[in-house]
Image (cartoon, helix red, strand yellow):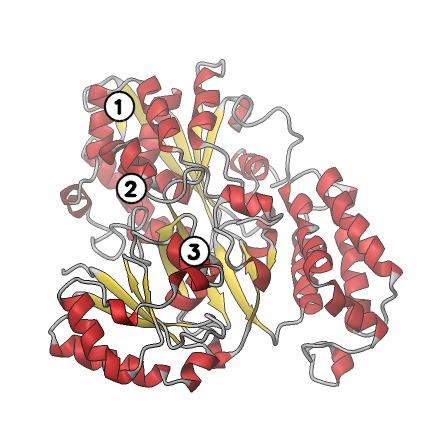
Amino acid sequence: MQTTRSMVLVSSDPHSMDKGAEEVFQKLSEQIKSFKLQNEISLSKVSDIGRNDASPLVIVYPEAIIYGPVRPADVPYLVEEHLYKGRVASRLQAPTKELSGKIAWISARKGTLPAEQRIVMQRAGLIDPDSIEDYIIHDGYQALGKVLSEMSPQDVITSIKDSGLRGRGGAGFPTGLKWDFVANAEGEKKYIICNADESEPGTFKDRLILEGDPHNIIESMAIAAYAVGADEGYIYIRGEYMLAQTRLLKAIMQAKDMGFLGGNIFDSGFNFTLHIHGGAGAYICGEEPAFIESIEGKRGEPRPRPPYPTTNGLWDKPTLVNNVETLANVTPIIRNGSDWFKSFGTPSSTGTKVYTILGNVNVTGLIEVPMGITLREVISIYAQGMKNESSFKLAQTGGSSGSIIPASLQDTPMDYDSFEKAGVSMGSGALLICSEETCVVDLAKVLINFFRKESCGKCNPCRIGNQRAYQMLTNISEGLGKMDDLDKLDEMSKWLYEMSNCGLGQTAGSPLKDILHHFRAEVEAHIKLKVCPAGVCPMSGKAY
């Protein structure tokens, strides 16, 4: 399979389209084919560049060279000079200094192709997930063999620490540090659990990882178990993921038959057994203490913390908990080294991130890209722009427990530290892209309704707070709200965060906080003017 060596993007914002961007795009397609470069050059459109006197723009990666204004007559020269001969078509080059402030995301990606870099999903779709032989042919179980024959448990932990891998479940806690805690915890019996209870709305990345490459999770769990001193593990998987469960069970049997699970693996003296435990559909069981309770046969409810699972987890024993995507990074790091892994992403958030793209965009689905990519890139390049040439308004990240991110933050690098500084969170990796037709009051109401129904009811702030917030949002959406409701919602978001027992209640206040911080004028319009600017809420006279 040939690898794309260059990517060409043509600006397709309304201003560029008025100045002939479509004709330039068609001419580029023709010229690339005439030079027989179609297998080497990727051509697509990029929107949201905004008005610029140099439009239409043509951007070429990995050099991040910006050309403009480009006319159809200029295209043969550009293709021959840059894409065929490999030289900068200098007479077409745009004033980069003038553009850098407006579209800084372009230079930020210089030196890399804005294309998928698969680490977690490298085998998904390429191998037969039901065949352990296919997995072994594609470097399967090499990392486990290396660990058991060449590395001490502390060597493995050090390698994961040095890689900078952080938990991909949303919190971004350093993975190697968590492993170290469990390894140093007192106790002869220790456990490892893979959290595969992917219940965040709009998130389906873990399902595809498990269905496409089940042996990778098994191998990674065995490596983690060796590193922390565990000899038994559980995969706590969402009950609806029947195909993933079937493939995991088959993969476990195959691994046992070949000696990769069980006793004395690779004649090393290391023993490891693995079990599957299906969930029953409770969102709360995405929380570590709740699914630990569930595995123990109890009702899935959160436990007070501390103590934490690292010291008092499953059956009160030290327990390592990592989610699917985090574990899927382990074997590539062991095989290729920490420095290799750090070559992707940003210094503080290394590696790649798997995102699911949904909403008002032309292309939805799943991508795996380096950490630090921006929302603008995701929308323009991977999602191929907003549907029906609509304007981007906001993105709801990470399922219900994520953040509502306004268009003003679409150039913020999507890594843990940058998002934290901006006051938002990355969450699980779901990206719901919304246009101007989305009402923030209605969106927050939907999210709070989800939280109030999924609350286990164990603590008052979550059980009562979400119900009260939902009723206030309902009143606002119907034109019955009062201005002091906004102060109450703001206080409620803080109470939920500070006083709830677990992450469900603590993140339930995020939609309230985000809409009041970024979209307060729109919320106030529902109260003061009795109108829904997006035309969604019932006061507009439209169907609700």
The C terminus lies in quadrant = bottom right
Callout 2: helix, strand or loop? helix
The residue type indicated by label 2 comes to Asn
- Residue 466 lies, with reference to residue 172, above or below; the image says below
Q: CA distance from mark 3 to mark 2?
A: 19 Å
Considering the numbered disc 3 on the image, is that residue within a helix, a strand or a loop? strand
Kind of residue indicated by mark 3:
Tyr
**264 versus 137 height, above or below:** above
Q: Nearer the viewer, mark 2 or mark 1?
A: 2
Residue pointed to by mark 2: 216
Report x, y in % for residue 313. Answer: 54, 27
Q: Is residue 233 left or right of residue 542?
A: left
Q: Which residue is mark 1?
A: 263
Q: Left or right of 281: which side holds 100?
A: left
Q: CA distance from mark 1 to mark 3?
A: 37 Å
Q: Residue at coordinates 49% horizontally, 13% vertically from top-left?
A: 186
Measuring from the top left, give residue 33's x and y in whole percent. 15, 77
Q: Which residue: 81% across, 49% down?
A: 491
Decide: few, some or many residues near mark 3? Use Cα within 10 Å; few <14, some 14-19, many ≥20: many
